[in-house]
Image (spheres, rainbow, N blue to C red):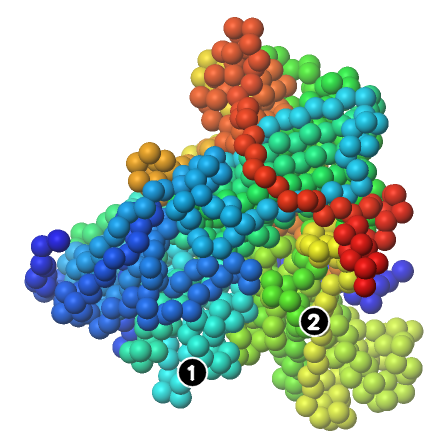
Amino acid sequence: MKTIKKSRTRLEKAHISLRVNGESVEVAFAPHKTLLEVLREDMGLTGTKHGCELGECGCCAVLVDGQPVLSCLALGLAMEGREVTTVEGMADGTSLHPLQQTFAELGAAQCGYCTPGFLLTAKVLLEKDAKPSRQEIKEALSGNICRCTGYIKIYEAVELAAARMRGEQAEPAEETIYGRQ
Amino acid sequence: MAGSNGSGRKNLKVIGKPFHKVDVKAKCTGEALYADDLTLPRMLHCKLLRSSVPHARIVKIDTSRAEAYPGVKYVLVGKDLPTSFGALPVSEDEHALCIEKVRFVGDPVAAVAAIDEDVATEALDLIDVEYAPLPTITSMQEAYDVSDPRIHEYGEDGNIHRKQIYEFGSVEAGFAAADYVREDITFYEGSTHLALEQHASLAHYSHDNKLTLWSSTQDMHYLHRHLAQVLQIPTNKIRVIATPCGGGFGGKCDPFNHEIVVSKLAMILRRPVKICLTREEVFYCHRGRHPVLMATKTGFKKDGSITAMHHRTILDGGAYGGHGVASTFYTGILQTTTYQLPNYRFEAVRVFTNKAPCGPKRGHGTPQPRWAQEIQMDRIAEQCGKDPAQMRWEQAVLPGHVTANWIKISTFALREAIDKVVEGSGWKKKFRKLPYGKGIGIACSAYMCGTQTPIYWNKMPQSGVQLKLDRSGMVTIFCGSAEIGQGSDSILAYCVAEVLGIDPFDTKVVTGDTDLTPVDIGSYSSRVTLMTGNAAIQAAERAREFLRQAVAEKLQVPGERLVFADRRVFDGENPEKGMTFIEAVWLAESKFGTLGTVGSYSPPAAPGKFKGATIGPSPAFSCTAAIAEVDVNPETGIVTVERIWIAHDIGQAINPVLAIGQVEGDVYMGLGEALMEDMAYRGNRNVVMKNPSFLEYKSPTTLEMCDVVTYLVGEPEPNAPFGAKEAGQGPQLPVPPAIANAIYDAVGVRIDEIPITPDKVLKAIKLKAKGLEGRVGPTVFPTCPMPEAIVVPTPYDGGDGKAIEDKAALAKK
Ligand code: FES
Ligand code: FES
């Protein structure tokens, strides 16, 4: 028989200030919580998803000070004074980020569950490199798993968004939309 | 000719165009709410205690310490939910929580509802379960050998769940007419869906005694019925809402323990109760690909034409029935749908083992026999000295064919598909001509668009759609289908918009809610586009008639001259004369009162009349040809798939960009199963699953995924909405055998079991270097006594679709 457990002493809530999606906020939460849990449970930002909560799937990626971070592996407490961006903060005011637009256009989001993680990871890639090669895109996104798309439409959406962000009047290739003839 | 479902229509404005999906912006912005994103006031959290042993009697469960733990509201055990259930009526062998026995590591035995997840998790440690261990059954062979203890008290005998045996025509005569006969034994390992979203459910029981369950499910209609059965409350007191599903692939088709448990807890406590499974628990829910061992004996002539096939399969079903009886049928019944096959015998056995239960995964039961058939076709071609692409082209099923087992094929562009990939890949310049280590291989397949019968027998439609039109100009489409990422919500909008001449985004699609939406039996069997599409078209055409009459009267134009397009209704001979769509709705609402229409779909009757004849037939069959080009490193055995060319007969794509997305997803999943995915157990150590995590269960990342060149081919299918056939499952099937055949072309070895891991390739290369057979794969096929076959004469030998026994019985009467 296992030893009788006493009720765990509940620690007092932690209270931090940070910036989330461009706004200063304060939040109180149980101090053992991950950033993923704080965002979803204490701030109502459920756009950030989870597929493993062990740092293995990339679903929960958010940006901390502009860098992709697996929110299931980051402690909420470590976010004091940091700048966090989630999928809810990707759009620029009323207009979608070009990546959100191209993911929608090309069906790069099927079930959509992996999508927030891919969008944020790709956003950082395009901020660093305006014209990444297909291989560079693959490498940048290799920590994000998608079980629906086979990744092809995701690459094509990243490439299309990159072209538009460079100011080109880019349209998807015929083959992307109708297949090879 | 234009069918009533628009399958031959020209001048399409919406169909065939790359509109974005109606729900995709919500999914790209975080607005879409999946099951675990939902919270309700006073909500409690649930956790399940799962068995730590693979096979045991439950001697005692003591929940008193857990109940006393601060924050715990209730502890539920098996006897609180005594009614059994299961996906199929023939195998209702599950309980929401185990009562007398546990059957695999992960089988749930108790559930805790508590104020938060942490308290619920901690309380699980305080539930004392005493187990009396039983010997375990860990393999097909053991299931054959050990009849005591039985994992279940039902089934054929011992640990054999199900035997099926059919003979169409005479394989003996077919083999006698053959120039060659060969038998190959092959194995396809089990794999799991690994949908990104962990299963989650939220239940609420209101003070007017109505239960609402939000759940990540593909089949809310069946779930609705199972909840009523187990909770013992009427279906009209239960509302099931299918939340946007973060990936299904068949893994969210079964009714699950956790869905029933949170419902029961919500009823007991009258508080909302939520559960979200951990990733490890998702592996225990499983219901994925059955491991299947196959022996395929085929007779053929020198030109490669097949005279007979005798195909035997054994399925390792895991601990429960689930959809397994259907899976068993599917390891054989579609073997006749790709190539001409005049005589066919099929024997299948499904066994129980103490592992997580298997079930339907993308292609349900069919990728395994396709694998066996397509790697054998490669050998047959070699034996006949024929090009395997050319031989497949010659033997391909043609449109209008009726198979030996009475499956009617309508449109079927397999030859066109083969031509496309052969040309696109440069096959003729590459096959058997690439340098050592580089190879190319081909495989084909066919797949159904929905099945003849629903899971429980009834004469009601498989799919229903209701439309509401009103003075707002909004057209609301209600349908019970479940959007699992495949785009089923959008298909409804596109079909209705095309018929009514409006923009798809002028509609509102309401799906997956048993209180609001007419029944559709669920997202499985590649049935949704065909069936909900046909129902939607019927409802929209009925609505168009109301508008047509009202507008014709107003404009004094004959109704048949009116055209519905570009958000207008106008005289086709004088397009100026007309009105906007919304004005047409006002007129119709004024003339007829409140506007609403319905549409339904039931598949046509199957031509076969023998027992089991309704499993396999489908309103339409898609088909696919795939060519893989690979690089095999002979030093390491590592296989890199460089590119796959794939041509899929979809009929007419309702939305090409979404169809291609499905095909690419199929290639991806086929690649994963071919090279790495594996539900692995430690047979000798407690039958525990080896790799229940994203890290240990290998699946392709961006770095393993190959390039894909997709061709959509075919003619509009008359039985399908605007001619559209399926794309979500069929294109996966030829991918693993195409890769295996390419490996043979590259290094001259045959790997006859999935997954093709580097160690197997290396072993085969070494065997070959020693002058032995360069092959890795199973060599023995265990047998067990089989009953008499159901013998059915084929259409080619004058059969009428009935079995011979049936005739004898009829004569006696
Ligand atoms: S949930 Fe964080 S990586 Fe999977
Ligand atoms: S879109 Fe479903 S997992 Fe990527």
Q: Position of residue A25 (x, y in %)?
A: 23, 65
**Circle 2 residues within 10 Å: few <14, some 14–19, many ≥20:** few
Give the answer, above or below, for where A90 lies relative to B267.
Answer: above
Q: Position of residue B654 (x, y in %)?
A: 70, 57
In the image, taking residue B545 as reference, residue B43 lies left or right, namely: left
Please name the residue shown 45% across and 17% down the image: B636
Which image quadrant: the C terminus of chain B?
bottom right
Q: Mark 1 sits on what residue?
A: B210
Foreground pick, B639 / B468:
B639
Pointer 2 residue = B459
Q: Position of residue B65 (x, y in %)?
A: 14, 65
For the N terminus of chain B, the image quarter is bottom right
Can residue A119 be seen in the rendering of this structure?
A: no
Left or right: B514 with respect to B574? Answer: left
Quadrant in the picture for residue B427: top right
- Label 2 resides on the chain identified as B
